[in-house]
Amino acid sequence: MKRSSFITWEQLKVGAVILAALAVLAVAIYKLGQAANLFSRRYELVVFLPNASGLRAGGAVFVAGQLAGTINAIEFLPVTNDTTKHLRVRMALDHDLESQIRGDSKAKVRTLGLLGDKVIDISIGTPRAQPLKPGDTLAVAPSLDYEAVLAQAAGAVNDMVDLTHDLRRITGGIIDGRGTIGQLMTNRALYDQLLHTLGRANTMLASFENPNGSFGRMLNDPTLYDKFVGVIQSADSLVVALNDKNGTIGKLLRDDTLYTHMVSMATAGDSLMKALSGGQGLAGRLLNDPALYDKLNKLTTDLGAILDDVRKDPRRYTRGLICVFRCGK
């Protein structure tokens, strides 16, 4: 049977659907490429890292948190003593951001979210530094080590587990009746004793509240309060009287005359003691000159002997006196 050379309607519809699908695919590819900056001009920058930390070729590169390029390659460097440059990461960045990435910009490895992919984030530079040219090297800023954080979190989890075990032992001891709290919870006799003690305490408090008792009168009778207020007022009046500048206490508190006199007396006493110690005057010589002391002692002894002799034989000393009186007459 000879095939028809005309295109049927069904074939046209299939062709139209295929063309429409190709158009949608082309638009999608263009939009995706535009979103990922696949069709924009790019230039290459380099960063040296001690560890890739989960980075991979084709990974994203951000500038100030915005997608700006991809990682072209991660290359191992020859082994050297410089532990900060084990890997060389070459990045392709959008050429429109060349004025934003400058000499003081910093590259940092970070994670998208808490457990997402590792990416490189570049900070925007300042006008003091020049823009980086293609092939230049970016400085690296310290990044957060999530493995260390997870290790610390694991340690905290272990501490929580140990704490849970300790709490389990404590609660087990309480349930078994060990310790004071355990006895309070499980020992009926101790509970009854505590209840009895609380009852006696309530009885004692009730007796305190008795209006005929001492404590009750102290709580309810205002007489003691009034007396206490009177005592305070009397004490206040006494303080006011003592503080009066015309009174004795007030003068002692305010007038320095007594203090001046006491200072003068102390000065005079000090001068007297210096004079006595220096041997000046009769008292000083009596204190310091033993010869004068001996003479005065001998004179006193002789006068005592003469007086004793006068008492024994007064005529011996008065005989001449009687003659004088009589002869004179």
Image (tube, rainbow, N blue to C red):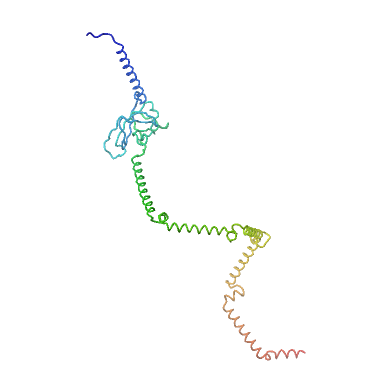
Residue 220 percent across, percent down from the top left: 60, 57
125 or 246: which is nearer to us?
246
Q: Residue furthest left?
A: 1
**Quadrant that contains the N terminus:** top left
Q: Quadrant of residue 280?
A: bottom right
Is 262 left, or right, of 67 in this rendering?
right
**Quadrant that contains the C terminus:** bottom right
Is 254 left, or right, of 124 in this rendering?
right
Residue 138 percent across, percent down from the top left: 35, 33
Residue 81 percent across, percent down from the top left: 28, 40
Classify 271 as above or below 157: below
Residue 222 percent across, percent down from the top left: 63, 57
Classify 180 as above or below 39: below
Classify 139 as above or below 268: above
Q: Residue furthest right?
A: 329
Q: How many marks?
A: 0
Is 75 left, or right, of 132 in this rendering?
left
206 or 68: which is nearer to us?
206
